[in-house]
Image (cartoon, helix red, strand yellow):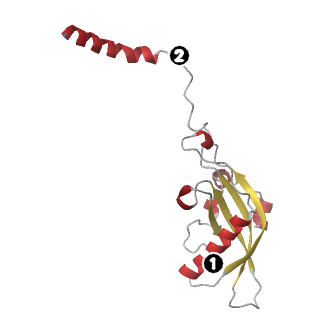
Amino acid sequence: MLRAVIASLGLLAVLPAAWAEVPGPAPISPYETPAEARWPPYSGDLPKCDDSGVLSTISGRFGEAENTYWGGNNSIAGIDGVREIGFRANGLSYIPRRYCVGRAAVADPRDPSRRPEEHTVVYAVTAAAGIIGFTWGVEWCVVGFDRNFAYAPDCHTLRPILERWLGAQPAIVKARY
């Protein structure tokens, strides 16, 4: 019986070495695997930048934050000039995001005679970032109203990684927004 145990232990020592030599497919890098193919998968189906649900979420949360935390009555009257600046711009394996920029007309309802001021709004629509991960979510920043510097400087950190590192944004776009 002792010989059987020793033989089985010897066999166990040889098996991993034999398994290591078995040819097979090369392991896939985690940076090459799309987020949709992982477990649990992410959905790459995100709303467009000019989707009414996205824009109303930004407007509503901006007004709520201004009223609740900063004591102001500023609100977003409308967002126009919306365009996409990146879709999955950080890589295929990262959580799918759609990066957008637009112009927000910020108004103070206490002073109706004053014309709304235009400010750049930068936002990212992210998969599985909504309430408890069931739907898409929005991270947003209005330039000039980032009072706690969460996305400082000038909402720059909410843009795609390559644009931040390489400065890939053309000078004409910087002047317009």
Q: Position of residue 34 (x, y in %)?
A: 62, 40
Up the image or down, 29 lies above or below 7; here it is below
| Image location (x, y in percent) of residue 69 | 54, 79
Task: Report helix, strand or loop for mark 1.
Answer: helix
Q: Amino acid at mark 2?
A: Pro
Q: Is residue 17 left or right of residue 156?
A: left
Q: Is residue 69 above or below residue 17?
A: below
User: What residue sits 62% from the left and 60% below the top?
Assistant: 158
Residue 131 visible somewhere in the drawing? yes
The image quadrant that residue 73 belongs to is bottom right
State the residue position of label 2. Answer: 23
State whether residue 154 appears in this view: no
Which of the two discs, 2 and 1, labels the residue nearer the N terminus? 2
Estimate how packed mark 2 is, as few (under 14), some (14 to 19) or many (20 or more) residues with alpha carbons within 10 Å.
few
Q: Who is closer to the viewer here, 47 or 112?
A: 47
Residue 63 has which mark?
1
Q: Which mark is residue 121?
A: none
Estimate the x, y position of residue 142 in percent, counting from the top left. Answer: 66, 71
Above or below 128: residue 81: below
* Number of numbered discs visible in the structure rendering: 2
User: What is the crowding at mark 1: few (fewer than 14 residues within 10 Å), some, or many (at least 20)?
Assistant: some
User: Which quadrant of the figure contains the C terminus?
Assistant: bottom right
* Residue 45 percent across, percent down from the top left: 69, 50
Q: Residue furthest left?
A: 2
Which amino acid type is shown beneath numbered disc 1? Gly
Farthest residue, direction top: 3
